[in-house]
Image (tube, rainbow, N blue to C red):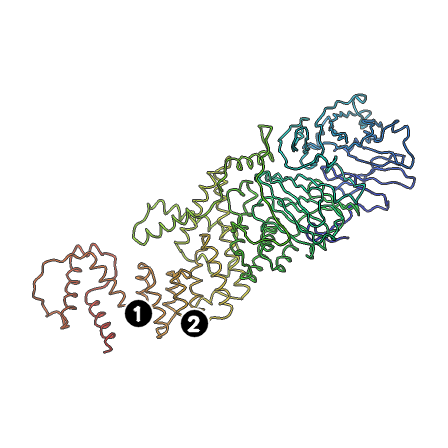
Amino acid sequence: MLQEPFVGGSLSNILENNYESLRILNVERNGNIIYTYKDDKGNVSFGLYDCQTRQNEHLYTFEKDLQVVSCSVNSEKTLLAASLVQSTKEGRKNELQQGSKCLTLLVEIHPVNNVKVLKAVDSYIWVQFLYPHVDNSHPLPENHLLLISEEKYIEQFHIQVIQENGNREVIKNYGHLPRERVAEDFVWAQWDMAEQRLYYIDLKKSRSTLKCIQFCADENFNLMFEAPLDISLSDSGFKLVNFGCGYLQDQEKLPKCLTLCVFTNRTGSLCVCYSPKFDSWEQITYSVFYFHKGYSKTFTVALGSAHSCVTKGITFLNLDYYVAVYLPGHFFHLLNIQHPDLICHSLFLTGNNEVIDMLPHSPLQSLSGSLVLDWCSGKLYRAFLNRSYLLQFLWKTRLDYEKMALLHCMLSCGRDPECLEAKIIQWISENISACYSFDPIQEFIIASSYWSIYPETSNMDKLLPYSSVLTWNPEIPGITLVTEEITLPLMKVHSFRNYWQKLNANLEYVKYSKPHLHYNNSVVRREWHSLISEEKTGKRRSKAYVRNILDNAVKVISNLQARNLEPRLIPLFQEEDNHQRLLVGLMVSELKDHLLRHLQGVEKKKVEQMVLDYSSKLLDLICQILETTWRKHNLHPWVLHFNRRASAAEFAVFHIMTRILEATSSLFLPLPPGFHTVHTILGVHCLPLHNLLHYIDNGVLLLTETAVTRLMKDLDNTEKNEKLKFSLIVRLPPLIGKQICRLWDHPMSSNIISRNHVKRLLQNYKKQPQSSVIDKSSFSVEFLPLNYLTETLTNIESSNEALHAFIGHDNVDAKFVEEAALKHTTMLLGL
């Protein structure tokens, strides 16, 4: 058993058979595998492996030594179509008709009955039954069979089956089967079994044109699109892809042949992968036409010296959101087809990587879907991305572009995302400073939030950011890239459903929406700064507007807490933190408006739920990083008290929180309410005073009322703590500072209160005519300026207008101001 950790968990034989001549012929749409083998007498037998029951079933035996070119069975397993060539050992016989090389037969196999000759020609024929989407309980009255001729035409036969004598099923109108021409004058064709589509390249005109025919359940087929291809196929010969499991007769010619494949997925992507004939042993070139993006990328890979002979052909594999380009023994390139703009989102591995050694070194054939056939061993594989190995590789690699690509590969897999996210967070916590070209926290938050909501609608790749990196300048060694615009496919039908609707939407986006529609927080940034500025100046928007914004935040936090029932170790969401709640609410409002503008045909309730889920996911990822860090360093909520010295663990957690703040600030993403309080308290623990004040002055640490209140209550009034408290109080916003000063029973606090009170009283003071003689009887201080100030304050406080204007302010009187001023003067004079 071969182990392939990168494109398959394990590669094992699907069939266990003692016949050495066993060959897989075809894989039908329902997953059933048709195979052939020769018995001891040399007779050719056909068998079927049912993927549902995991049982083998004999279909038919030809009592002759024949070479099978192609074979297919209908969905009811009543008809077998086979294309055969007489063995060269016996030469041509009358059964194959005089002068014919290839015989195409239609056999009734339920029960075994008639054999009808469909074609007897001197060219090869390939056969394929259609498998329309129908209810198995109501089989179609008619079967449809495609015949693909080496003479460059494709026909469709319509075969009706009726029941006779109980359960005996026979062909109706046996002597004349209706048929029609589907395509002609083509040099290349590919069959998509899963989606029942035929791709072919028409050379009628001077240029290569890719066409696609969609076969439907109602017997109809439609030409869906035409797309010009800037490739040369005139001298390449005739080639078929996915019409059964073909074996090349001359393996030595394999590298010299071109390779061309079409891949699609459910999101509306359309990729044409092309590798021309080898011109040199020193390098290989291949192109990917991203029709759903409107451009192509041509890659040139250096293979080494001229003596590094390439004996195996290139293989293109379809891996859902990725296409793998594989040249055994040389390189493996995993191309991101959803987000192909930047090369760092694709993974490129060369021959000196251990992954290359673990992959099969024999030629591979990519079949419909993710099936892969090993030509040498005859084994059939199911290819998929192995997340466990990707994660191991992420820990080992030291290259930034590989880290970026691996991160996106894992998140796109979609299976058990919570477990995967936890493992990625562990990697981030260990390697937070090991990435130089991108911020791993930013990339993880943006990419994981994107993939959490992406499956709900295919348009999300146009509307939501999937990466924090906008450009990528570093080159990737061993590969060069050229990007070119291409002509978009011309859709030939006007009524679209399912895949075709999504492809058409992608094409329309490329045509008419050149400016990127990705959501960003620039509008949120402006609005948030405006609200905070209004709060400082005492102005506010309408209460209804602010209430709506805060209600959005409440919904997000409730949605988040409903999904996470386990209590968190880190104390978040335990305070109001209106600034962060405003930021959350604004992001919800702007993101909802953005999606409603550009998502056509999606219900408003669904969009609102998507926005709530996206915003909750973003906050949850930040909480997960914090929670993982706290558990890793074994921290508990009591570390937030001030009666202990900071430990090395607290330093590590403070560093992680600072990196989270840096990552979210540059993208202007919200933080969980309570984040700044925890961060500030850890900063007081961990930093010397001058560093702490530097962090505060530069906006790294944000002083919250909760954090400073706890500090004022927990710290005593030693000289060091007094200096710290005063340094923090003078940096607080006025509204918060007024509240905090009342909590600190200290002359410094009294001085601040009195200064603020005097400033407030005198701001709008208008001098009134007064007697020039000052009554000193009520004052004990022989200091005229102070006496005058005290008298003025007393007069202001005693006026009814002043009382009305300053109602609700600090309970401070002129006598208190006098005492505070005298005490402060005494301290300054050193008396």
Q: Which image quadrant for residue 29?
A: top right
Please, is residue 243 above or below residue 421 in the view? above
Residue type, label 2: Asn
Instruction: Give left or right: position of 42 versus 685.
Output: right
Between 261 and 274, the residue placed more toward the observer is: 274
The spot of residue 17 in percent (x, y) is 84, 46
Percent x, y of residue 184: 71, 27
Q: Residues within 10 Å of mark 2 (few under 14, many from 20)?
A: few
Callout 1: few (<14), some (14-19), or many (20+) C-alpha neighbours within 10 Å? few
Q: Is residue 738 left or right of residue 678?
A: left
Q: Nearer the viewer, residue 722 or 691?
A: 691
Q: Which amino acid is tagged 1?
A: Asp
Determine which quarter of the picture holds residue 86.
Answer: top right
Pick the quarter of the image with the C terminus: bottom left
Question: Which picture quadrant has residue 742?
Answer: bottom left
Q: Verify CB contact (< 8 Å) between mark 1 and mark 2.
A: no
Q: Is residue 710 visible?
A: yes
Left or right: 315 as drawn, with respect to 566: right
Q: Which mark is residue 643?
A: 2
SS for callout 2:
loop
* Residue 677 x %, y %: 42, 61
**Residue 600 circle label:** none
**Residue linked to disc 1:** 745
Query: Which residue shows up at 53% across the image and 53% down it?
Result: 443
Q: Is residue 440 visible?
A: no
Where residue 41 sits: x, y (%)?
A: 92, 39
Earlier sequence position, callout 1 versus callout 2: 2
Which one is nearer the viewer's eye here, 655 or 328?
328
Disc 1 on helix, strand or loop? loop
Mark 1 and mark 2: span between their CA atoms? 19 Å
